[in-house]
């Protein structure tokens, strides 16, 4: 158990492989008769791994559980209390990023299992199934309702598959797996994503691909291009004509072209294509579509105003992060809140049914809700800045970075 704990810590701290570390700590915690000193450290490290991945809800739940079950275990109870102070205001029950991330991971494992069974590689298939089981058992502890039912059904199917792998009838096993509802659920990525989620994730992939181009890291370029395609696909395949879908399709095509040339060592050509595609994206869609979720929630006529407001918020973040003390982030945030409230007031005015469609009324309602959320977030930033906590203010503004 001590060796497992050390291996998980090594993956987390040295390699930065948080998924691998999570699975090791989960498997350790599932064992019977784990000594309290090992259990507490494994719980704490598991919470840190989730935090580093941005999966705040399971991280908060683990730190709370640690304090509830082991209140006097130092230094971990003290660390858990400190982490909760940092994380609790940011955790949101509607945040499903961790769930989406695990579903993506399971989908990748399902494709690996397809290949292992196709080539009758029983030992590899068994290893993959066990990894799936570990991920599913972790997920079910954080879920409820329909999500939990889906995970439970898939977990039962995978346990049956694990038991059947001891036989030598690989063809029958493979046929059963290919028709399995569990496999379909793992590979059903279309239900995972809303355009907002895809937009933010693809923007992150673009940033990482650009850095990999500088480093001439062909493997990382291919990986980020693949991730961008994986996030964009479900939105693009809906066939709905929208700016978000158009943007994602253009990113998908451009990253694929860059990855193809990087794989052949043609980095200069890849950089030229990336530069041209970036210019096209910025010119066609602007910063709002590239980085800020919820484009479809606002009428087109107010989008330029929102870009200007968000640029001011981004300037506030840059001021906080810089060493230049001449800027005043609190004034910038105050101005942004005033402008947002003015825009929100306009959106609240009744829509003339003769000159507007039902879509416009629904759009205004969604836009109003989103603007209220922005104003609340930025008011919290004001309070934090007033208390002199620049680190916390920076954390609150990061989601609005352009």
Image (spheres, rainbow, N blue to C red):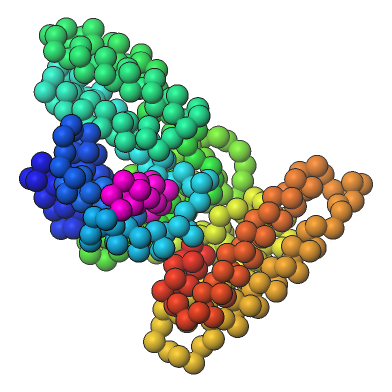
Q: Position of residue 41 (x, y in %)?
A: 20, 51
In this view, 192 is above or below 21 = above
Q: Nearer the viewer, residue 341 or 156?
A: 156
Exactly how many numbered labels are in the figure? 0
Figure quadrant of the N terminus: top left
Closest to the observer, 329 or 233 = 329
Q: In percent of the image, x 56 and y 69: which residue is there?
A: 380
Residue at 89% x, 46% y is: 353
Which residue occupies 42% across, 48% down? 57
Residue 272 visible? The answer is: no
9 with respect to 361 (left or right): left
Q: Position of residue 153 (x, y in %)?
A: 39, 20
Residue ranking furthest to the front: 72
Residue 182, given in percent of the width and then of the height, sits at: 37, 21
Residue 354 is situated, as x and y percent measured from the top left of the image, at 92, 47
Q: Is residue 68 magenta?
A: yes
Residue extending furthest toward the left: 3
Residue displayed at 17% across by 49% down: 37
For the residue pair 316 and 41, the one nearer the viewer reads as 41
Q: Which residues are magenta?
A: 52-71
Q: Can residue 332 be seen in this snapshot?
A: yes
Predominant secondary structure in magenta?
Answer: helix
Give residue 121's quadrant in the image: top left
Residue 73 falls in image quadrant:
bottom left
**Does the magenta-highlighted stretch encompass residue 308?**
no
In the rendered view, would you say 199 is above or below 306? above
277 displayed left or right of 270: right
């Amino acid at each position: 158990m001590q060796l497992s704990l050390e291996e998980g810590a090594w993956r987390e701290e040295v390699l930065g492989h948080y998924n691998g570390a999570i699975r090791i700590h989960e498997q350790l915690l599932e064992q019977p008769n784990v000594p309290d000193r090992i259990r507490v450290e494994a719980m704490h490290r598991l919470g840190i791994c989730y935090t580093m991945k941005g999966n705040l809800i399971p991280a908060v739940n683990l730190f709370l559980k640690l304090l509830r079950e082991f209140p006097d275990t130092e230094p971990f109870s003290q660390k858990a209390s400190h982490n909760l102070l940092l994380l609790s205001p940011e955790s949101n029950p509607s945040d499903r990023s961790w769930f989406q991330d695990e579903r993506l991971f399971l989908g990748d494992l399902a494709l690996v299992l397809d290949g292992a069974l196709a080539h009758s590689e029983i030992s590899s298939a068994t290893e993959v199934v066990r990894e799936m089981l570990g991920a599913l058992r972790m997920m079910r502890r954080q879920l409820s309702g329909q999500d939990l039912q889906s995970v439970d059904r898939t977990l039962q199917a995978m346990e049956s598959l694990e038991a059947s792998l001891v036989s030598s009838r690989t063809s029958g096993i493979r046929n059963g797996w290919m028709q399995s509802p569990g496999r379909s659920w793992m590979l059903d990525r279309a239900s995972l994503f809303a355009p907002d989620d895809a937009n933010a994730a693809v923007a992150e992939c673009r940033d990482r691909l650009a850095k990999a181009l500088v480093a001439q890291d062909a493997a990382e370029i291919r990986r980020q291009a693949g991730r961008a395609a994986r996030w964009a696909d479900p939105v693009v395949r809906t066939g709905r004509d929208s700016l978000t879908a158009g943007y994602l399709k253009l990113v998908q095509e451009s990253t694929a072209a860059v990855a193809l040339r990087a794989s052949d060592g043609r980095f200069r050509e890849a950089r030229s294509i990336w530069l041209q595609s970036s210019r096209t994206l910025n010119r066609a869609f602007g910063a709002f579509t590239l980085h800020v979720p919820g484009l479809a929630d606002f009428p087109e006529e107010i989008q330029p105003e929102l870009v200007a407001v968000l640029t001011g918020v981004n300037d506030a973040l840059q001021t906080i992060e810089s060493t230049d003390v001449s800027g005043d982030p609190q004034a910038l945030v105050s101005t942004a809140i005033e402008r947002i409230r003015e825009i929100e007031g306009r959106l609240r005015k009744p829509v003339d049914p003769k000159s507007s469609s039902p879509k416009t009324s629904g759009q205004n309602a969604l836009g109003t809700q989103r603007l209220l959320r922005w104003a609340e977030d930025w008011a919290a930033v004001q309070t934090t800045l007033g208390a002199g906590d620049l680190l916390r203010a920076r954390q609150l503004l990061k989601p609005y970075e352009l």
